[in-house]
Amino acid sequence: MGKIDSLLLAACCLICCLSCQQTAIERNEPGKPYILATTGMVADMVQHITGDSAIVEALMRPGVDPHLYKASQGDLRKILDADYLFYNGLHLEGKLASILEKQARVKPVVAVGDGLKRLIKINETTYDPHIWFDVSLWKAATANAARQLVALDSANAAYYQANAHRYMEALDSLDIWVQARINTIPPAKRVLITAHDAFSYFGRAYGVEVRGLQGISTVSEFGLRDVSSLVDYIMAQGIPAVFVESSVSDRSLKAVLTGVRQRGGTVRIGGDLFSDAMGAEGTVEGTYIGMVKHNVNTIVVALTEK
Ligand SMILES: [Zn+2]
């Protein structure tokens, strides 16, 4: 551990002792590792594998955009407290990734998407990080996370393997369900327009044409030319609905809606999709499976309405 890291850790322990004794006790149940995951999707995956043998927490709350996320002092304390860190990887977490990678010198840090690079390369250096929208890719990421957890906590190996197996079976069923639901949309209407390009894998896996106004990261801003080319596309194809994302501002899509109306067309907001963050904790949409079902049902209803 470097000198600065040690100082940070010491300062952090002091702050914890003085101000957050309660949280520290909750996180440190004897015999159970405290696992910090970046997104809700990764936390949900890890929780399914570890069951009641670990304390799992998501760093990013519902509605938070991981591309733009910056760690607060409180986050740094959690990162230092964690026994293991799990993240999506593939550049989803933006600036946070370098903090996590530094922590890999002192504790296990796992990027669940790393083993998938072979399957998802866009070009030599770019990967699309939104692997959770192709359920079969998320299943592969789950298998990767399970392998790592089994290696890290071998006393619970059989339990973790059984849990992972059960969860991956549920993901298989979900994958089949998604395809069956999408197949109910008339083929010409299988077009998904969103604020940013989170749904490419979804489109590729289930046969949906996908257009985003911003690129695969929300870091890049959209321009007037992007808006007008999307307006052209909507007018030419007669697209009935576009979709808002819970973790991205709807400002960009409103510009598209205005553009279509100015040209005498009609397009509406088809509903809210959870793209890079899940729904509220304790709700069905606050789980990965519930989030996927919510999105698919929203898309199917909006694109099949007369
Ligand atoms: Zn995104």
Image (tube, grey):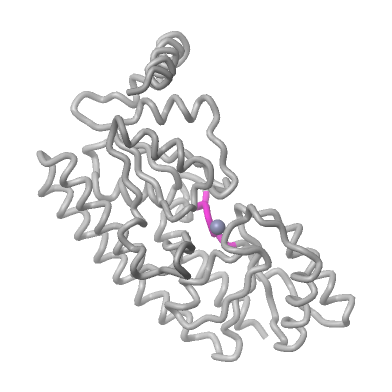
Q: Quadrant of residue 64?
A: top right
Q: Is residue 278 magenta?
A: yes
Q: Residue furthest front?
A: 124
Q: Quadrant of ligand 1?
A: bottom right
Which quadrant would residue 302 be assigned to in this image? bottom right
How many tags in the picture? 0
Question: Is 256 drawn above or below residue 221 in the view shown?
Answer: below
Give coordinates of residue 158: x percent, y percent: 10, 49
Counting from the top left corner in percent of width and height, residue 304 is at 60, 83
Counting from the top left corner in percent of width and height, residue 257 is at 79, 70
- Residue 111 image point, x, y percent: 35, 49
- The quadrant of the rendering that contains the C terminus is bottom right
Rendered residue at 30%/30% (across/down): 106
Left/right placement of residue 61 relative to residue 173 reads: right
Q: Residue at x 53, y 42 (%)?
A: 95
* Looking at the image, residue 246 lies above or below residue 171: above
Is 188 covered by the magenta stretch? Answer: no
Q: Quadrant of residue 105?
A: top left
Residue depicted at 24% across the width and 44% down the height: 51
- Judge by depth and name the residue closer to the eye, 293 or 66: 66
Q: Main secondary structure of the magenta part?
A: loop
**Quadrant (top left, top right, bottom left, bottom right) of the N terminus:** top left
Magenta segment = 273-279
Towards the viewer: 247 or 11: 11
| Image height of 286 relative to 260, above or below | above
